[in-house]
Image: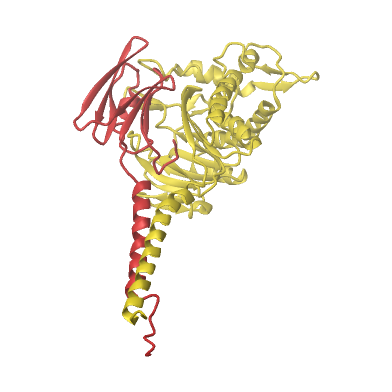
Chain colours: A yellow, B red
Amino acid sequence: MNKKPWQEGKKRRFCVVSRLLSLFALLSLLLPSLFSCAPAYTQINSYGMGTFAVFTVEDDEDASALVSLLAETENEISFRVAHSPIAKLNGGEEVFLSEDLQGLFALAASLQEQTNGRFSVLAQKETVLWQFDAENPAPPSLAALEDAALETQGALLTQRENGAFSLVGGGIDLGSAGKGYATDVLASYLKEKGKTGLIAVGGSIACVGKKTGDWKIGVRNPFSQERESLLGVLSLREGFVSTSGSYEKRFFYEGKEYHHILDAKTGLPVENELISVTVIATSGALADMLSTAAFILGLQDGFALCQAYGAEAIFVCRSGSVYASSSLSSRLEVENFEVIYR
Amino acid sequence: MKDTNIRLFRKWDALVLLLLLLSALIIFALQESEEKPTSLLVLIDGEVVEDIPLPKEPLLKAYLVDGKEITVCLYPDGAEILSSPCPHQTCIKSGKITRKGSSIHCLPLRFGVLLDGKGEIDGVTG
């Protein structure tokens, strides 16, 4: 007996509904898998270089390697580590430096020249006078600072005929470059392995590619001490970011603020309109040093300096004004502040 | 025999399909975007020493690091360091953290607390 048309229709609708339910089941299983095709990242936390480091990488093995590399880098560049190349140079010895370190010092020398000596990595005689980590810190005497600053201005790091380096006068303190340099070393490790990830050594960050989308880098709100208070969020897939801010390390003495960003010509904390400078550059050492150098120079000259080195920057003034490179306008989300792009 | 011209899909079939697709997407989105952290990791020297579920009521925890005591308060939505012997008390001034992936550190003691999970922010500069 032939089926009636309405029975045929009912049967077909049943088929359709069955197919739809199957589709739903498939989607429920498939969607998570589709989105998890991008590599899951593992995060490892560590302490090193006097700060907190976070490595967001594809493999646990890479994370462990980065922890070791960070320790090795600290042993290479910290003047506080006995027998480090830097400690030896400060002690008057001749030292053969790695190519990476030679590159770092060449860049530092360039910035020293561009800032007319106000930025210097040879200012250790001045920096050690400031005991920011002491329980009751107080500013050093002006006489002591003057002597130390004179020594810095006369300091010279030279390469001998045999290729070894020696330091005459002053002392090397890579505080304004070390974390950025460390991100360079660690980022190179990932790049050589063809891996992506994010490396954060304190506030110096290296973005080493990302399979999907951009890394989201929060820029601290310099007007708040709260950890989660952000000025804005920067989207970055590749590149290096560093921030120098007077709020990071400071003390108050007899009602006056003393922060850690020193003018190498005087040994005194820089006094200008700025409270923080964030730099985005093609290397960690450059981002780190440039953020300090630009802070020292102030808004106008600091901005010009960043442009001269092909870097992008965000300048935050004590007044609350925020200036940023125009190329950041599509990659920087800021709330509660008005940004002037230039 | 009259040709009834039975259609494979009617309007309500399309509606059902759309609803099912939306449901699948919503279920997926809900799974992926749980905003609130659920536990606090306590780190000493970079190693996780404790993983504490966030409590329903505020909970005080004290830790001894190199013979020095540091206290942490856990809340249903986050945590903060309440007391520390470090000179500048930066860890205390950092306030309360509530976002997944946020952390506070007492660098002199190499002590830190970290809210579990992956937040929207991958790193913080400054």
Q: Quadrant of residue A180?
A: top right
Residue A137 or residue B89, whichever sits in front: B89
Q: Taking B71 as reference, is A311 above or below it?
A: below
As drawn, the residue found furthest toward the bottom would be: B2
Residue A17 or residue A341, whichever sits in front: A17
Quarter placement of the N terminus of chain A: bottom left
Residue A116 is at least partly visible in this image: no
In the image, residue A315 lies at what x, y percent? 46, 43
Left or right: residue A278 versus residue A119 is: left
Q: Quadrant of residue A317?
A: top left
Residue A70 or residue A322, whichever sits in front: A70
Left or right: residue A185 versus residue A249 is: right
As drawn, the residue found furthest toward the right would be: A161
In the image, residue A12 lies at what x, y percent? 38, 73
As drawn, the residue found furthest toward the front would be: A1
Residue B86 is at least partly visible in this image: yes
Number of numbered tags placed on the structure image: 0
Q: Taking A171 as reference, is B75 above or below it?
A: below
In the image, residue B91 lies at what x, y percent? 34, 26
In the image, residue B54 lies at what x, y percent? 27, 31
Q: Taking A321 as reference, is A7 above or below it?
A: below
As drawn, the residue found furthest toward the top would be: B67
At 39% from the left and 84% from the top, the residue drawn is B5
At 37% from the left and 24% from the top, the residue drawn is B112
Residue B18 or residue A303, whichever sits in front: B18
